[in-house]
Amino acid sequence: MKRVWSLILAAALLLGAGCHGETEQNRYENPVQRYYLYQDETTGEYAGALGAMGSEAAEFEEDVAAYIQDYLEGPQSPELRTPFPVGTSLEKCTLEDGTLTLELSDAFFALSGIDRTLATACIVYSMVELPQVEEVVLAAPEGTGSDSLLSVPLTPKSFLLFDDSATSDEMTLKLYFSDAGARFLVEETRTRSFASDAEVPTYLVEELLGEPEKETSLRVLPEGTALREITLDDGLVTVDFSQAFLENAPKTHVQARMAVFSLVDTLTELNQVERVQILCQGEKIDDYCGLDLTEPLTREESALDKGTKGSFDTNLYVPCGGALATVPSAIRRTVGRTVAADVLSALLSFTSCGGYENPFPAGTLAVEMEIRNGLCTVTFNSAFALCDSEPAQAEQAVRAVVATLCGLEGVSAVQIKIYNAQFTSVDLSEPLTVGEDWILP
């Protein structure tokens, strides 16, 4: 993956936990200086984003909490702008032995990367202006993802004020949203920089929770869903969503498939991610419109719109959660074969993944196929009969064939025959049509 780091506060972050031990004694003067960002980033004393930090004078009274809350509401000067998102407020503060500990609202901790660094720098520079404040600690709410700026004593010396864009890179990332028909995933790209690799998965999920840039693409993660926590450990990303992920779940299996694999295929674009575990409120999900999400999921290439020239767009029906699930598929055509033969071949070779199952015994082949007057007669080799000892598997194999072929134009019923083998689990003496309860909504 191309990595292109752009304007970052080069190690904007901590020069080390030992920083706070070197803080000079605060020299208090009234009025104090309150730091925000310039409207024009080229205004600052230094090159780079943090160099665009400016200040304005303000009187300090004895009420520290009231002063901090007033500071968070933004600057008076039209030349300055606030780095804090709407809703940022002070929950609690304590001052002890020169250390000012601030507990801010969740809105502040929704910031990430350079935005959080800038906001934190403004707070630290402003707070050490107050009497007896030598260092600042930002205490994150419980359940908030952490980074090196949280719960660590900070002083102005904790930040480097320069632009390293000439030697650093940005990352170009791929995300997947749904196409307009909610059948395949389509690609969008984003290019930006990050303070650390750990921020990238969070950024990708937040982008998927937002709106796509292309008008022809659709957001598929449920409305109102929020990211509670995300962790990466040994190739496994665990994504914990809010209750809205379940309460506002898609109404159909195909839509749920798009939502799940939009997330999985986006995250597995990262070299360090192999599997994705989806949670809701910290709990595993055993049924998401037919999808079993209790185990980590791997990348699903068949969900992507490959745009392959000459392919045939159809549905395969495969077992999932005890019923048949609709799997939109772009079938590559083979010269000299019928559409039905290519579709059936794709069904027989379907790869089990993400809760979807291939019910056909190894070596199963269709040796003959004929379509006449709406009836498709297909003869399988004897390998098909190996599932006869497992009635549930045999039933699902038969249903998968019938549902998939009946989805083709000109096919209304399927007659299944098996060459040189007995089959007793399902009555194959008459043509079969699709049952009303076979397929997941």
Image (tube, helix red, strand yellow):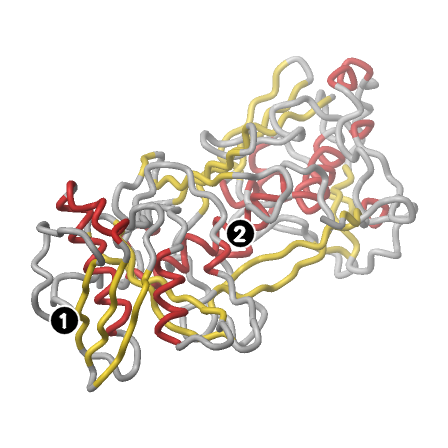
| Residue sitting at x 79%, y 54% | 38
- At label 2, counting other C-alpha atoms closer than 10 Å, the crowd grade (few under 14, some 14-19, many 20 or more) is few
The outermost residue toward the front is: 420
| Residue sitting at x 56%, y 37% | 66
| Residue sitting nearer the eye, 286 or 11 | 286
Give coordinates of residue 85: x percent, y percent: 58, 51
* Residue type, mark 1 in image: Thr
Image quadrant in which you'd find residue 318: bottom left
The answer to whether residue 383 is left or right of residue 277 is left
Residue identified by numbered label 2 = 206
The answer to whether residue 121 is left or right of residue 232 is right
Q: Secondary structure at mark 2?
A: helix
| Residue sitting nearer the eye, 297 or 366 | 366
| Residue sitting nearer the eye, 230 or 79 | 230
Give coordinates of residue 233: x percent, y percent: 54, 29
Mark pair 2, 1: CA separation? 44 Å
| Residue sitting at x 56%, y 28% | 234
Residue mark closest to the camera, 2 vs 1? 1
Above or below residue 139? Residue 394 is: below
Give coordinates of residue 182: x percent, y percent: 40, 69
The outermost residue toward the bottom is: 373
| Residue sitting nearer the eye, 220 or 241 | 220
The answer to whether residue 309 is left or right of residue 423 is right
Above or below residue 138? Residue 303 is: below
Image quadrant in which you'd find residue 127: top right
Q: Is residue 391 visible?
A: yes
* Residue type, mark 2 in image: Glu
- At label 1, counting other C-alpha atoms closer than 10 Å, the crowd grade (few under 14, some 14-19, many 20 or more) is some
Q: Earlier in the sequence, mark 2 or mark 1?
A: 2
Residue identified by numbered label 1 = 433
| Residue sitting at x 75%, y 43% | 35
Give coordinates of residue 382: x percent, y percent: 25, 52
